[in-house]
Image (cartoon, grey):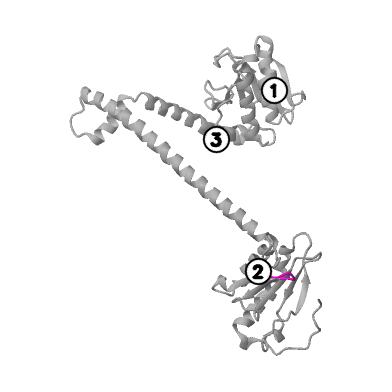
Amino acid sequence: MDFREQIRDLGSRIGQLKEHIGTEEATKNAFIMPFLQILGFNVFNPLEVKPEFIADVGLKKGEKIDYAIFKDNEPILLVECKHWEVPLDVDKESQLFRYYHVSSAKFALLTNGIDYKFYSDLDEPNKMDSKPFLEFDITKIKDNQIAELKKFSKNEFDKNQIAASASELKYTSALRAALQAEFNTPSEALVTHFARQAYGGRMTQSVIEQFTKLFKRTLDQYLSDLITDRFKSAMETEKAKEDAAKAKDEAEKAATTPDEDGIVTTEEELEGFRIVKAIVCQKLHNPSRVVYRDSKSYFAILLDDNSRKPICRLYYNRGKKYIGLFNNPKNFQGGGGKEDHRAELPDDNPNDGIYNYANDLLQTIEWYENPDSVPAPTTTEEPQN
């Protein structure tokens, strides 16, 4: 499972197990330690995860923090844990506040295994903020929150990158909370702002009260319509993807189904055809002039669906795979159609080898299109079969 799936799986398990977790220590073992493991830290390696980390803070000796997460021998995250039923409330007496300013760790986490709150020192250097810059309920976590959380994983951790986005996250969260409050109970200032754009009379208290009800009703309807439109758009996009996938499956099925003569046109041959077509269309304005005809012996690619205008042949139905070329002047005197030679293609991916013969293919097209430019044929050895 990838990181997103692991986090969602943990959230699902927590929802099922929480009623069986009776202590803070059990919360740590069942919820928080698996969370740290998903982030990539070895909870059994004291060089990475140090439980009950001790530090002397002022006159207090032997102060402990539940976990200190280390990377490259430096503390990067302080973790204070609570029982899953305990609401999270950071106050000035919190262990995180007391220890943060004497630690070199840039980030702190307060969690009860379900709710997670990440803090930094955005307001004042070396002093932990009173409000988190990232918070979520792991049982209801959103994709954008998972993306931010992944930055704390061992392999991706970069304190400068996290610090750069922390400020934006903090303020966007505050704006989101303010918007939610306005949506639930519109303030008089907001109602008045919009009412002035719809009503030209004097803004009395009774008018404001009337528009408060209208504004709330209009806002609810607008959000409902917006969600409906988004959902409809998503459904249409999904249907388009399903239709495309279905068409691709049908094409692949048709490509591997023998015709009445027992000829099977493989996807590998069709890919080779598309590569040849892309190459020769550098000299052709109409791609539809390039066609293929399959046979039991070889896969022929022709110009203008004319058997006397072969561009190349692909021999893919044998152990070794070859491309048959026709760029010999004698093939353009009186008809042609006889291969100049066959070139062996790589066993692992023969279609990649076609690009090595791009100039030969383009030469063939040039002579078909401009027969007066074909040089006089010279004597050559008979082609090898």
Q: Nearer the viewer, mark 2 or mark 3?
A: 2
Residue 33 image label: 1
Instruction: Give whichever of discs 2 and 3 has the lower sequence position.
Output: 3
Where does residue 355 sit, x and y in percent of width and height?
A: 70, 67
Disc 3, SS: helix
In the rendered image, is residue 104 in sight? no
Quadrant in the picture for residue 309: bottom right
Q: What amino acid is labelled 1 in the image? A: Met
Q: What amino acid is labelled 2 in the image? A: Val
Where does residue 292 sit, x and y in percent of width and height?
A: 64, 70
Instruction: Give whichever of discs 1 and 3 has the lower sequence position.
Output: 1
Which residue in the protein does label 2 denote? 276
Residue 150 located within the stretch drawn in magenta:
no
Q: Kindly check if marks 2 and 3 are in contact, taking CB atoms under 8 A apart as contact.
A: no
Which residue in the protein does label 3 denote? 144
The vertical placement of 229 against 294, above or below, is above
* Residue extent of the magenta highlight: 293-298
Seen from the viewer's position, the closer of residues 60 and 357 is 357
Q: In percent of the image, x 60 and y 36: which residue is there?
A: 161
Q: Residue furthest left?
A: 201
Q: What amino acid is labelled 3 in the image? A: Asn
Disc 2, SS: helix
State how far apart marks 1 and 3 are (Cα): 23 Å
Residue 105 image label: none
Q: Nearer the viewer, mark 2 or mark 1?
A: 2
State how far apart marks 2 and 1 are (Cα): 56 Å
Residue 295 located within the stretch drawn in magenta:
yes
Seen from the viewer's position, the closer of residues 344 and 263 is 263
Left-right relation of 206 to 26: left
State how far apart marks 2 and 3 are (Cα): 43 Å
Where does residue 185 sit, x and y in percent of width and height?
A: 36, 23
